[in-house]
Amino acid sequence: GENVEQHPSTLSVQEGDSAVIKCTYSDSASNYFPWYKQELGKRPQLIIDIRSNVGEKKDQRIAVTLNKTAKHFSLHITETQPEDSAVYFCAAFDRGSTLGRLYFGRGTQLTVWP
Amino acid sequence: NAGVTQTPKFQVLKTGQSMTLQCAQDMNHNSMYWYRQDPGMGLRLIYYSASEGTTDKGEVPNGYNVSRLNKREFSLRLESAAPSQTSVYFCASSEFRGSVDTGELFFGEGSRLTVL
């Protein structure tokens, strides 16, 4: 099955700085890469996703880049704010032989200091 | 719309006891999932149901059973609870699109289970 590795496991930044979280995946057949944000005590929620036919996608202060050749993708958050503090999970959709499945990374705890 | 509702929110069990976590979604999604979340381990898939009438094992199925009761409901059962099953359990649903992608996963609020 797919193996998704996520780094760093913790990240602390000053308000206004940028934050970057990186993920690698193992299966070149994976074709869909979502990012979920989980605030403390809450449920994970989708914040952005990218498909394998696209190299970059932006949504206001967040962006995701994908390098299919190197099999890695990254989440970029600019002008960070305290409300960006949360755990962020990357994931990769492995189409598999019959039914596809989503594999999650282990998460990055982002703390934004005011 | 309530989205994904799971019960109970908290439960304490003794080793060897059984229990069922209930999950229901009102978004008419085809697919439903059960994940467990442990510190530093991310979200690990226990079982999923791509469509009504089907269930498949995920990464960590041992010690669990599931039932897709109908399109709305997907339950997770622990037959003989063990301390290693202490975790936060999330149910999720999505409009699964076969080999394209899962679609957005909508999660329930989570169920915190402690096995003593």
Image (cartoon, helix red, strand yellow):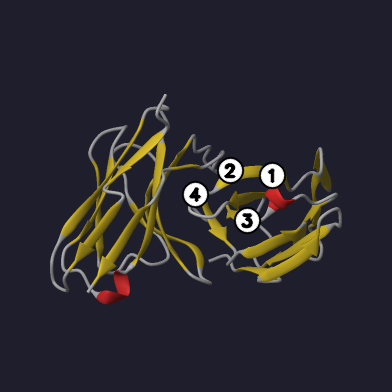
**Three-letter amino acid code at the position of disc 4:** Lys
Where in the figure is residue A5, as x and y percent of width and height? 65, 70
Query: Mark 1 vs mark 4: which is more N-terminal?
Result: 4
Query: Mark 3 vs mark 4: which is more N-terminal?
Result: 4
Query: What residue sits 72% from the left and 45% below the top?
Result: A50
Above or below for A98 versus B71: below
Where in the figure is residue A46, as x and y percent of width and height? 61, 43
Q: Secondary structure at mark 4?
A: loop
Label number found at residue B101: 2
Disc 3 marks which residue?
A: A86
Observer-nearest of B112 and B105: B112
Report, in whole angstroms, how far the alpha carbon at label 2 lies from the one at label 3.
25 Å
Disc 4 marks which residue?
A: A42
Where in the figure is residue B80, as x and y percent of width and height? 16, 68
Query: Mark 3 vs mark 1: which is more N-terminal?
Result: 1
Where in the figure is residue A88, as x and y percent of width and height? 64, 57
Asked if badges 2 and 3 are on one and the same chain, I answer no
Report, in whole angstroms, how far the alpha carbon at label 3 lies from the one at label 4.
10 Å
- Tell which residue pokes out farthest to the left in this image: B17
Report, in whole angstroms, how far the alpha carbon at label 3 lies from the one at label 1.
17 Å
